[in-house]
Image (cartoon, rainbow, N blue to C red):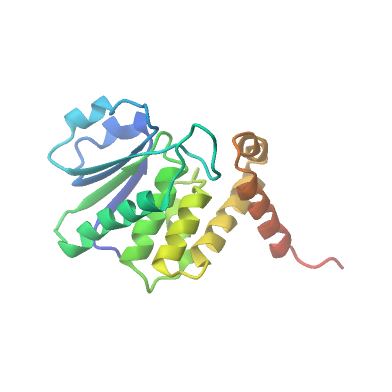
């Protein structure tokens, strides 16, 4: 990995967890909806450290739903620091949410950005995007993490560029995301697209 972090990283969804049970995962960040049961697949994993967080995949406050909050992001970053404070050969971090698309990719971006503060935000985000081509990182998580890491909005800008690439390749995502209350992400991606377009001649 170009960012040269001292541990292996994997992002996946719940359905993919069995594929990673025998690959030496040492740390798991498990992000689940509040009422979702703990995945059975963890019973087949070897010994590992696991942090379980529960909140919905939302970017705006929504009645009767648990949105990502600063305390969740602080826990993500604290968990990431455990891999840096006691680096061990063969350390392998797996981050999962339900589909491995939004909450997990946003969290992994923040963990890598914390591990390598000297690496530009764009390089970090694009590396996670290459690793997980269907990534659509949760903007609320990224915004809070960007501020907490002192990245000056660069992580947010790099993630909106991913939205632009995804919308260009999969235009149908716009309707799906807007229907799920993610209008701000779609608007950010479209603005990025306009800004990136060459001037009319």
State left or right for residue 114 relative to residue 101. left
Quadrant for residue 53, please give it: top left
Task: Give the total of numbered labels.
Answer: 0
Q: Which residue is situated farthest in the bottom direction here?
A: 118
Query: Can you say which quadrant of the picture contains the C terminus?
Result: bottom right
- The residue drawn where x is 22% and y is 63% is 84
Residue situated furthest right in the rendering: 201
Question: Which residue appears at 59% of the width and 35% of the height?
Answer: 180
Q: Front-most of 193 and 29?
A: 29
Percent across and percent down for residue 10 are 32, 47
> Please, which residue is most extreme toward the front here?
63
Which quarter of the rendering shows the N terminus? bottom left
Q: Is residue 1 visible?
A: no
Position of residue 115 relative to residue 130, above or below, is: below
Q: Is residue 100 left or right of residue 169?
A: left
**Residue 12 placement: quadrant:** top left
User: 89 or 95, which is in the foreground?
Assistant: 95
Can residue 108 be spotted in the picture? Answer: yes
Compared with 139, 173 (above or below) is above
């Amino acid at each position: 990995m170009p960012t040269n972090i001292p541990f292996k990283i994997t992002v996946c969804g719940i359905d993919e967890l069995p594929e990673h049970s025998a690959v030496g995962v040492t740390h798991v960040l498990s992000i689940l909806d509040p009422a979702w049961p703990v995945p059975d697949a963890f019973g087949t994993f070897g010994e590992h450290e696991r942090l379980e967080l529960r909140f919905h995949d939302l970017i705006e406050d929504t009645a009767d739903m648990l949105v990502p909050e600063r305390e969740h992001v602080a826990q993500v970053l604290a968990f990431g620091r455990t891999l840096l404070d006691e680096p061990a050969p063969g350390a392998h971090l797996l981050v999962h949410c339900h589909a491995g698309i939004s909450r997990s990719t946003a969290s992994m971006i923040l963990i890598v950005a914390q591990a390598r503060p000297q690496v530009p935000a764009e390089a970090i985000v694009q590396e996670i995007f290459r690793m997980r081509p269907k990534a659509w990182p949760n903007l609320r998580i990224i915004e809070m993490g960007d501020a907490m890491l002192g990245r000056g909005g660069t992580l947010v800008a790099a993630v909106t560029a991913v939205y632009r690439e995804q919308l260009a390749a999969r235009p149908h995502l716009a309707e799906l995301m807007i229907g799920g209350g993610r209008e701000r992400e779609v608007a950010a991606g479209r603005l990025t697209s306009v800004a990136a377009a060459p001037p009319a001649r």
